[in-house]
Image (tube, rainbow, N blue to C red):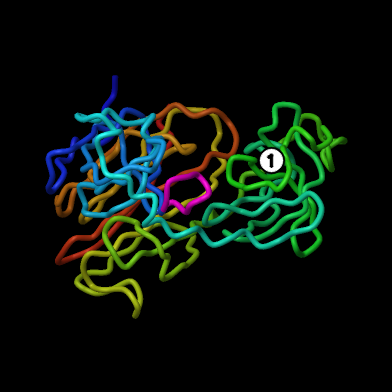
């Protein structure tokens, strides 16, 4: 079994737990309707602070000091969850989803691609941001992709995993949508990749996002300075995502960073993780076999002190 976290030791407290799943969302309250503050990873240790009334969620403190809620089904506690104090009374209800009429969904991630067809091998038409409400027109038979109309009137497909719907997905009609004449799409590699960057004024990717930008590459050298005027020169973090077309083959991905960095491919950990380590000026590589089509790349970056830089590249080796 691979350990995706770093086995971080919680700062204080005798009630602890170890993350037992690859990636675990830490939320602002005890339920999936609450926003995601950060993530912890398999093997990471957290301090247990309390629970909700029925014990299905626990309030925790991460090794980085951030407090939030996690599902108790995905941790291994060293005490009975029922022995923790009930903190349900301290929970502030999440901001309600804007009211919508008809079949609709609200985007629940920072940026979500809208594609020409139901799959990552289809070209991106546009993207929608967190909180955007889209009209639901249909679905695929496996419920993984939704045909939607975005606010500007365009139609396209997006992943059902990143939206909150106001109706059960299974109630929507199964449709092939605008791709009826394209049963076997031929993706076209973009001439320029677009990276979407979200910056946080803390070193744990904790909300809110205070600055965003789009770039054709991840190649930053902030030195002893700051990425933006509203971000400190130390103890900041950032997340960069891009959907990139690859021909089938084996690729070598290279990251050079000061300080911590973590790499994901198609939302799964991809073998590079120094995110919780103060390790200046390190270069790491990983070789990965990739199928032809679009793939989501994600880099999580953390700056502690002194110089800050991040460079990312890849090359086809087989």
Q: Where, by quadrant of the figure, is residue 211 drawn?
A: bottom left
Crowding around mark 1 (Cα neighbors within 10 Å: few <14, some 14 to 19, many 20+) is many
Q: Quadrant of the C terminus?
A: top left
Magenta stretch: dominant secondary structure: loop
Is 30 colored magenta in this rendering?
Answer: yes
Q: Quadrant of the N terminus?
A: top left
Magenta span of residues: 29-36
Front residue (pair 76, 162): 76
- Residue depicted at 40% across the width and 43% down the height: 25
Instruction: Describe residue 2's horizontal placement relative to residue 123 as left or right.
Output: left
- Residue depicted at 21% across the width and 43% down the height: 47
Instruction: Describe residue 158's horizontal placement relative to residue 250 as left or right.
Output: right
Instruction: Describe residue 9's horizontal placement relative to residue 214 as left or right.
Output: left
Q: Where, by quadrant of the figure, is residue 21 drawn?
A: top left
Identify the residue under disc 1: 122
x then y, percent, for residue 299: 38, 49
**Residue at the top extreme?**
1
Q: Is residue 42 above or below residue 299?
A: above
Front residue (pair 18, 56): 56
Residue 254 visible in the current orientation: no
Q: Is residue 117 above or below residue 235?
A: above
Front residue (pair 241, 40): 40
Is 158 colored magenta in this rendering?
Answer: no
- SS for dot 1: loop
Q: Is residue 279 above or below residue 203?
A: above
x then y, percent, for residue 86: 32, 45
Residue 59 visible in the current orientation: yes
Front residue (pair 78, 239): 78
**Residue at the right extreme?**
181
x then y, percent, for residue 286: 32, 34
- Residue depicted at 25% across the width and 29% down the height: 80
């Amino acid at each position: 079994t691979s350990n995706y976290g770093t086995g971080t030791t919680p700062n204080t407290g005798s009630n602890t737990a170890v993350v037992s799943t690859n990636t675990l969302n830490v939320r602002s309250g005890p339920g999936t309707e609450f926003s995601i503050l950060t993530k912890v990873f398999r093997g990471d240790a957290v301090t247990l602070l309390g629970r909700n009334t029925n014990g299905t969620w626990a309030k925790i403190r991460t090794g980085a000091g951030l407090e939030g809620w996690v599902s108790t089904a995905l941790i291994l506690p060293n005490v009975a969850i029922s022995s923790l104090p009930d903190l349900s009374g301290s929970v502030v209800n999440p901001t309600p989803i804007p009211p919508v009429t008809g079949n609709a969904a609200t985007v629940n991630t920072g940026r979500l691609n809208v594609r020409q067809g139901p799959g990552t091998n289809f070209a991106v038409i546009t993207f929608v941001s967190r909180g955007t409400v889209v009209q639901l027109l249909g679905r695929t038979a496996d419920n993984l992709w939704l045909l939607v109309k975005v606010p500007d009137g365009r139609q396209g497909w997006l992943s059902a995993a990143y939206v909150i719907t106001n109706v059960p997905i299974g109630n929507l009609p199964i449709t092939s949508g605008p791709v009826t004449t394209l049963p076997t799409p031929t993706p076209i590699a973009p001439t320029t990749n677009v990276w979407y960057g979200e910056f946080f004024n803390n070193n744990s990717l904790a909300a809110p996002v205070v600055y965003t930008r789009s770039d054709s590459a991840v190649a930053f050298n902030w030195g002893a300075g700051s990425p933006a005027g509203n971000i400190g020169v130390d103890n900041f973090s950032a997340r960069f995502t891009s959907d990139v077309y690859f021909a089938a083959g084996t690729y070598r991905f290279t990251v050079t960073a000061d300080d911590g960095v973590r790499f994901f491919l198609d939302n799964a950990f991809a073998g590079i993780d120094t995110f919780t380590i103060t390790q200046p000026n390190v270069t790491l590589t990983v070789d990965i076999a990739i199928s032809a089509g679009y793939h989501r790349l994600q880099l999580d970056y953390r700056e502690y002190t002194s110089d800050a830089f991040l460079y990312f590249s890849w090359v086809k080796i087989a």
